[in-house]
Amino acid sequence: MRILLVEDDTSLAEGVCTALRHADYTVDWIADGVNAYHAIQNEVFDLVVLDLGLPSMDGISVLRGVRDKGVSVPILLLTARDAIEERIQGLDAGADDYLTKPFDLSELQARIRALVRRASGRASEEIIFGDLSIDTGSRAVCYQGQPVTLTRREYSLLMELLSRPGHVFTRDVLTQVLYGWDEDVESNALEVHVHHLRKKLGSELIRTVRGVGYVINKALA
């Protein structure tokens, strides 16, 4: 899962990025509002963590701007503890949740998981898809009743594809989800991850759409 963090406090941002990457998320970081506004419109993110006090364009303006453009990505606001009016404005402008500073990183991760569940229409942390079961809280994966060990990127790829069974994800979108902006990517990296998932979870789960990308086989649900 790919998260955009928009935060101008360098030490806080570095701590959040480290924690989320240790939890196997792909995290990109922007420190100002204008660049965040354009990135949210033009890139593919599963969730945005947005500070309200930003240089060049404040968080409320970023939020209103992207919602006016029809961008529906879940957005979690970071606010000062005494900024009640800003929190109200943010929720009214289309934010999905907020967290007041200072916050515990484990609470941030729990709120992220809750927003992702809500966005996908799930009521619990368990995903059942045919012979596949996933506990998204512990990231435990079982196939045909047996535990399966997935690498961080294999898990991220699987979760992205399962977020919309039957939807064809392009190679570019999936590569962005897995790697973000910060890493050089081998040309066949995505294909390697798909190959490993097929070996571990059966060859029929992920279908290749030639010249486009990959899709979860809805017939196996």
Image (cartoon, rainbow, N blue to C red):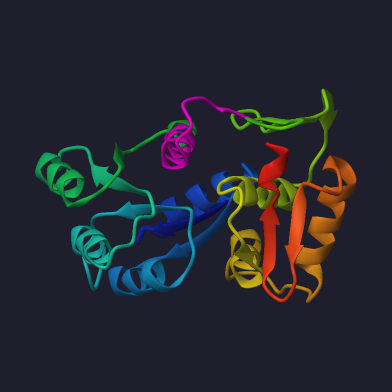
Foreground residue, 171 or 155? 171
Image position of 190 (left or right of 159): right
Residue closer to the observer: 197 or 23: 197
122 left or right of 216 in image: left
Furthest residue in direction front, as rendered: 219
Residue extending farthest to the left is 85
Identify the residue at the far right of this view: 199
Q: Which residues are magenta?
A: 108-127
Magenta segment: does it hold 77?
A: no
Q: Is residue 17 above or below residue 62?
A: above
Residue 5 x/y as whole percent: 43, 57
Left or right relative to 79: residue 40: right
Left or right of 84 on screen, residue 160: right
Q: Residue at x 57, y 51 (%)?
A: 1
The C terminus appears in which quarter of the rendering? top right
Residue depicted at x 84% and y 62%: 192
Q: Does 53 appear above or below 217?
A: below
Q: Is residue 110 magenta?
A: yes
